Image (cartoon, rainbow, N blue to C red):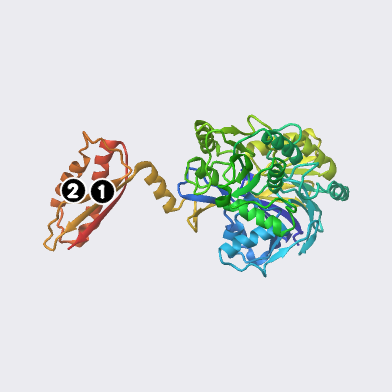
Amino acid sequence: MSKEELIFCPLGGSGEIGGNMNLYAYGKENNQKWIIIDMGVSFADDSVPGVDLIMPDAGFIIDKKKDLMGIVLTHAHEDHIGGVVHIWPQLKCKIYATPFTAALISEKFKEKKIDISSYLKIVPLNGKIKLGNFEIEFITLTHSILEPNGLSIKTPLGTVLHTGDWKIDPNPLIGGQIDEQKLRSIGDRGVTAMICDSTNIFSPGRAGSESEVRDSLLRIMEHKTNRILVTSFASNVARMESIFYCAKKTGRNICLVGRSMHRIYKAAKKCGYLKGLIEPLEPRDAKKIAKNKILYLATGSQGEPMGAMNRIINGIHPEVNLENGDCVIFSSKIIPGNEKKLYHLQNLIVKNKIEMISEENAFVHVSGHPNRDDLKDMYQWAKPQCIIPVHGEHRHMAEHVIFAKEMQVPETLLIENGDIIKILPGDKPQIIDKAPSGKVYLDGNINVETDSQSIKDRKNLSINGYLEITLIVSNNGKIKKPIISFKGLPENNEEETFIFDMEDEIQNICRTFSLENKKQEKNLIELIKQNCRKIVREKTGKKPFTNINIARV
């Protein structure tokens, strides 16, 4: 008889920052019931042109959906919930979330015209749910978003503490303080393993408090006499409230710019937050306000090409413009991978003689993740027998293992996406198998594999350009002058001859084929493609994506 087991398997977020998706299973080997903790996305860069979002490949759990009891969401950041609307239709299971996270999930499904109401279950703050043998208790933590939760996952074999994203903020401004008492109580009862955030493992000291940022922002704004534009993560509602607070204290009106800023503002108000604030102006009304009486709060703090900040600084936003002497404050950190586009945007701001303030030259941001002293406190409260680092690149997770050993945690385990870990029973958690894992790209509104032909073709087009040749063949088998067009190939107008060279080559090739014989078309097309690509390569150094058409008239 096989024994019951408690299994953990990350499909995303281990060995990377973003795309968090974690599985737990309980039961005997061939009769296990599963839950999913979070289902996030990461954002694509220039290496995959045309792709916006990258998600964990959920095929492993989709194959087991009849044994899936639900999705439990820790908080509403995109790297934890962004994949739900794209993956859930293949699962059709219940979703459990606290009110603010549930409000944002509802909006996502409304945009997709999917009625999720019968599946979405709202869990009160510090609430409990029971899914099969999993008794899951939500623990209020502090983070850079409303309602961040750790999860105590209790089973007949033992308890796992899944921290989600967190920090220790003694004065979070919105929402409750971290529930130290509950964490201590869970620790006293015994925690077999803690699955823990590793993002800031290289940062000494503490992450800092939102209240300190508010005080610093107010001191900065009190001395400004022109327009002020603050850009920040829309999801940081405490930071949003701080900007409203600073606007009121400095006698300014406030205007929200960007769809996600409005969406988060409305969701927070709906859930009972952001009370007693001044009413924000619409951008069209803000234009009429004197420049020393307006404060903008905008999206696009990472230099996103379509973000509000980029459009404002490039002068293409229809209702917001900045000029010499105005001030832009980046109340955010640079997410790794965004440096190039963000520095380009910031250089453009400085070039336009607009004052720029960021975390590089002022105290305008604190992280939402635990620094080393925060981690020490969590270890002391939870007293885990084993630390399993997640939510970090390999370098973060390896350092977290070293740190946990220095803190005298009895066991540590370094893992990566796809590892199947038996947490219990046994002397210590260990990797016992490997699940298929990987990434899926959202290409337009279609999920595609990372090696899909559409991605390969687009990469080729972006590097080598496009060449199209059309042959018009008459009924008697004679061809007219080929029609040749191209995009993305470098030209030298004084010496450009590759068009004429290709025309001659095509004529020579066609003389060796009987164009009345359609069976020869495939070989004809292939030979033209090879020889014309060779001509272009010799003349330009490029190997264009080539398409040959034969039209018979």
Q: Secondary structure at mark 1?
A: strand
Q: Nearer the viewer, residue 422 or 328?
A: 328
Please provide percent x and percent y for residue 459.
41, 46
Seen at 57% across and 62% down, the residue is 111
Disc on the earlier residue, 1 or 2:
1
Q: Which residue is mark 2?
A: 506
Seen at 52% across and 31% down, the residue is 353
Residue furthest bottom as drawn? 118
* 3D distance between C-alphas at marks 1 and 2: 14 Å
**Which quarter shows the N terminus?**
bottom right
| Left/right of residue 510 with respect to residue 333 in the rendered view | left
**Which quarter shows the C terminus?**
bottom left
| Left/right of residue 273 with respect to residue 329 in the rendered view | right
Characterize the local packing of mark 2: few (<14), some (14-19) or many (20 or more) Cα atoms within 10 angstroms.
many
Disc assigned to residue 60: none
Tell me, yes or no, if residue 81 can be seen here. Answer: no
Please provide percent x and percent y for residue 503.
18, 46
For residue 335, which quarter of the picture? Answer: top right
| Left/right of residue 398 with respect to residue 411 in the rendered view | left
Disc assigned to residue 485: 1
551 is higher (above) or lower (below) than 188: below
Please provide percent x and percent y for residue 487.
31, 46
For residue 537, which quarter of the picture? Answer: top left
